[in-house]
């Protein structure tokens, strides 16, 4: 009897582990070159609680906790009145990068994780990357990817416009 239970337990564990690794199966990565130095661009986008300053769809950001410490949360209010709760997963001012997850949202995605990173580009400019992984939730993979890509595109276009050289 124990022999039968052990393989079944192992099989159940492996099945559960396999389903966990499927989380975040979709991804979106966007990048844009910005006409200013990473240090200057970081002053705008590096504050975890400042998405309302640089993303056109966000009208308010309220922080709980220290915005550079893992576990801090921001509640975003969007221009349509919807809200999102996001949690800081990692933060490095030295690497000009942070990662976060969405805890609550009306977006049709689950298991959302994103990373925003700034790196030096040629001629003193900045390469801004915003990448995310997620699963579609209630819509097709293509629809979920299009929605998340649109969110990234809108934010990055606004940052780029803020620093555009004539």
Image: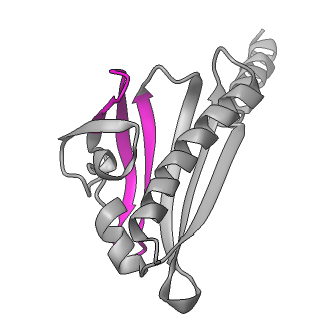
**Outermost residue, front side:** 166
Q: Main secondary structure of the magenta part?
A: strand
The spot of residue 153 in percent (x, y) is 57, 49
* Residue at image coords 35%, 79%: 39
> Residue 81 lies in what quarter of the image?
top left
* Residue at image coords 68%, 35%: 146
Left or right: 16, with 108 as reference point? right
Magenta includes 82? yes
The spot of residue 73 in percent (x, y) is 28, 39
* Residue at image coords 81%, 13%: 4
Between 115 and 145, the one nearer to me in the picture:
145
The spot of residue 143 in percent (x, y) is 71, 26
Using the image, determine if residue 7 lies above or below residue 150: above
Q: Is residue 63 visible?
A: yes
Magenta includes 72? no
> Residue 137 lies in what quarter of the image?
top right
Q: Which residues are magenta?
A: 74-103
**Outermost residue, top side:** 1
* Residue at image coords 31%, 34%: 76
């Amino acid at each position: 009897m124990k022999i039968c239970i052990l393989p079944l337990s192992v099989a159940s564990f492996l099945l559960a582990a396999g389903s966990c690794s499927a989380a975040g199966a979709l991804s979106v990565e966007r990048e844009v070159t910005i006409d200013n130095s990473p240090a200057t661009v970081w002053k705008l986008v590096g504050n975890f609680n400042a998405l309302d300053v640089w993303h056109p769809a966000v009208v308010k950001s309220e922080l709980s906790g220290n915005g550079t410490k893992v576990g801090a949360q921001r509640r975003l209010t969007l221009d349509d009145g919807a809200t999102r709760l996001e949690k800081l997963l990692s933060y490095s001012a030295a690497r000009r990068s942070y990662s976060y997850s969405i805890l609550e949202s009306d977006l049709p995605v689950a298991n959302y994780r994103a990373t925003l990173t700034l790196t030096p580009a040629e001629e003193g400019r900045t390469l801004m990357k915003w990448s995310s992984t997620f699963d579609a939730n209630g819509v097709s993979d293509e629809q979920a990817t299009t929605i998340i890509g649109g969110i990234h595109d809108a934010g990055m276009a606004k940052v780029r416009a803020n620093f555009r050289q004539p």
